[in-house]
């Protein structure tokens, strides 16, 4: 039995300039999402292309997927 949920709610909070910020309301994402997937999501929300972001999860940079 897998005790890790398949989806989680994430809030994306940034100290970057306003043009790189999205609404901080929680968004449901799959726990299999990695840095590339989240960058694509944020780029889509910002209506930008080919932007790569770094993500902190509980104070650590995301290097695998959210399930880890």
Image (cartoon, helix red, strand yellow):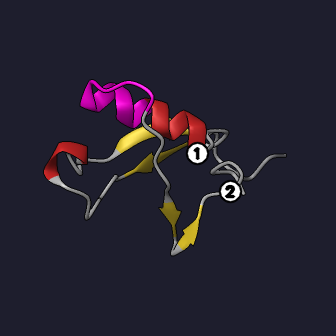
Q: Residue furthest bottom?
A: 59
Residue at image position (68%, 56%) is 63
Q: Position of residue 60 (x, y in %)?
A: 58, 71
Q: Residue furthest right?
A: 1
Q: Which residue is mark 1?
A: 35
How far apart are labels 2 and 1 at the CA level? 7 Å
Please tell me whether the stretch drawn in magenta is mainly helix, strand or loop.
helix
- Tell whether label 1 touches label 2 (CB within 8 Å): yes
Image quadrant occupied by the C terminus: bottom right
Q: Is residue 43 magenta?
A: yes
Mark yes or no: residue 52 visible: yes
Q: Which residue is mark 2?
A: 63
Residue 20 lies left or right of residue 59; in this view the side is left
Which segment did they paint magenta? Answer: 41-50
Q: Position of residue 28 (x, y in %)?
A: 43, 38
Residue 45 lies left or right of residue 36; in this view the side is left
Q: Position of residue 19 (x, y in %)?
A: 17, 43
Mark yes or no: residue 22 visible: no
Residue 43 lies left or right of residue 61; in this view the side is left
| Nearer to the camera, 4 or 22 | 22
């Amino acid at each position: 039995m897998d005790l890790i949920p398949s989806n989680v709610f994430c809030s994306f909070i940034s100290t970057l300039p306003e043009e790189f910020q999205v609404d901080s309301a929680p968004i449901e994402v799959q726990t299999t999402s990695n840095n590339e997937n989240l960058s694509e999501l944020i780029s889509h929300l910002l209506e930008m292309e080919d932007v790569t972001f770094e993500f902190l999860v509980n104070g650590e940079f995301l290097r695998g997927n959210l399930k880890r």
